[in-house]
C-alpha cells in the first residue's frame, strides 16, 4: 500500500453520516431552546429531554484559514404549530460566510441580514446555499423525515447567538396542513 495515499473522511450523501474520521457530536434538546419558539406554553409542555437537532463535526485544527465541516441533523416535529428549527446565529466575525448543502429531508433555510430583512431558501437533497457574511442563518424542518445539511465554515467565524435574542423576522408554522410563513412584528 502506498503510504502517500491517504483515506480522507467520508460522508454518506444519503444520510450525512461521517466515517473514517473522529467526530465531535452535540445534541440540542427542547430544554436548551429557551425563548426560541413563539408558543411558550407549548414549549413548556414538551418533554425537556426531547432531542431537536444534533450537529456532528469533523475534528479539525482551528485557526486562521482553517475550516469546520459539520452536518446538522434536524428532527421533524413542532412546538405548538411551529416547525422544529435550529437556534440560529450570526457569526461572531460578521464578515465570515458559510456554505450549506442539503442532504436529505425537506426544509427551509432562513437568512436574515443585519437590518432585519429575512428570506427563505428551500432545502432538499442537493440544494446549495451560499450564506454571505453579515447574514444570520437558521434551519427549519418542514417535513416528516430528518432534515440533514452539510456545512463548511471558517473556524474563526464563531457564533453570536445573543444578537438574535429578539428573534428572526419570519416564523414558519403549519396551518391547515399547509406551510405558512408569518412576519413577526419587532422581529
Ligand atoms: O455552523 C453552522 O451554521 C451550523 O453548523 C449550525 O451551528 C448548526 O446548524 C446548529 O445551529 P445553531 O448553531 O444555530 O444552534
Ligand atoms: Ni453558521
Image (spheres, rainbow, N blue to C red):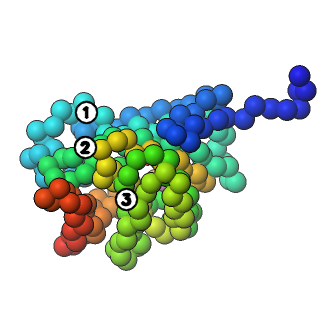
Give the residue at mark 2: 77
Regarding mark 1 in the picture, which secondary structure is present there?
Answer: loop
Instruction: Give the camera-side residue of 38 and 6.
Output: 6
Residue furthest top as drawn: 1
The residue that label 1 is drawn on is 50
Where is residue 106? Give x, y as percent: 38, 52
Q: Residue at x 25, y 43 (%)?
A: 77
Q: Which of marks 1 and 2 is in front?
A: 2
The CA distance from mark 3 to mark 1 is 21 Å
Tell which of 69 and 96 is nearer to you.
Answer: 69
In which quadrant of the rendered view does residue 27 lie?
Answer: top left
How many C-alpha atoms fall within 10 Å of the one at disc 2: few (<14), some, or many (≥20)? Answer: some
> Left or right: where does residue 97 sit relative to residue 140?
right
Whichever of callouts 3 and 1 sits on the residue coming sooner in the sequence is 1
Query: Assess mark 1: CB under 8 A from ligand 1?
Result: no
Badge 2 or badge 3: first in the primary sequence: 2
* Mark linked to residue 186: none
Please indicate, yes or no, whether residue 91 appears anywhere in the rendered image.
yes
Secondary structure found at label 3: strand
Earlier residue among tags 1 and 2: 1
Q: Tell me the CA gap for discs 1 and 2.
A: 10 Å
The quadrant of the rendering that contains the N terminus is: top right
The answer to whether mark 3 is within 8 Å of ligand 1 is no
| In the rendered image, the vertical position of residue 47 relative to residue 144, given as above or below | above
Say which residue label 3 marks.
108
Residue 82 in picture, x, y percent from top left? 20, 53
Q: Residue at x 54, y 60 (%)?
A: 128
Q: Residues within 10 Å of mark 1 (few under 14, many from 20)?
A: some
Query: In the image, which is nearer the foreground, mark 3 or mark 1?
Result: 3
Q: In this view, does 49 lie to the left or right of 107?
A: left
**Res 9 → quadrant:** top right
Amino acid at each position: 500500500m502506498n503510504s502517500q495515499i491517504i483515506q480522507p473522511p467520508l460522508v454518506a450523501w444519503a444520510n450525512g453520516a461521517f466515517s473514517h474520521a473522529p467526530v465531535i457530536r452535540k445534541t440540542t434538546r427542547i430544554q436548551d431552546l429557551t425563548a426560541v419558539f413563539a408558543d411558550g406554553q407549548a414549549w413548556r409542555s414538551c418533554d425537556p429531554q426531547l432531542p431537536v437537532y444534533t450537529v456532528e463535526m469533523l475534528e479539525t485544527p482551528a485557526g486562521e484559514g482553517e475550516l469546520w465541516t459539520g452536518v446538522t441533523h434536524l428532527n421533524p416535529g413542532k412546538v405548538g404549530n411551529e416547525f422544529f428549527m435550529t437556534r440560529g446565529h450570526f457569526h461572531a466575525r460578521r464578515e465570515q460566510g458559510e456554505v450549506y448543502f442539503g442532504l436529505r429531508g425537506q426544509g427551509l433555510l432562513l437568512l436574515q441580514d443585519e437590518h432585519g430583512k429575512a428570506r427563505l431558501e428551500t432545502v432538499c437533497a442537493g440544494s446549495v446555499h451560499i450564506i454571505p457574511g453579515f447574514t444570520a442563518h437558521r434551519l427549519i424542518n418542514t417535513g416528516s423525515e430528518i432534515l440533514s445539511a452539510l456545512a463548511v465554515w471558517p473556524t474563526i467565524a464563531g457564533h453570536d447567538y445573543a444578537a438574535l435574542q429578539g428573534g428572526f423576522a419570519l416564523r414558519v408554522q403549519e396551518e391547515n396542513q399547509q406551510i405558512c410563513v408569518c412576519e413577526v412584528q419587532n422581529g
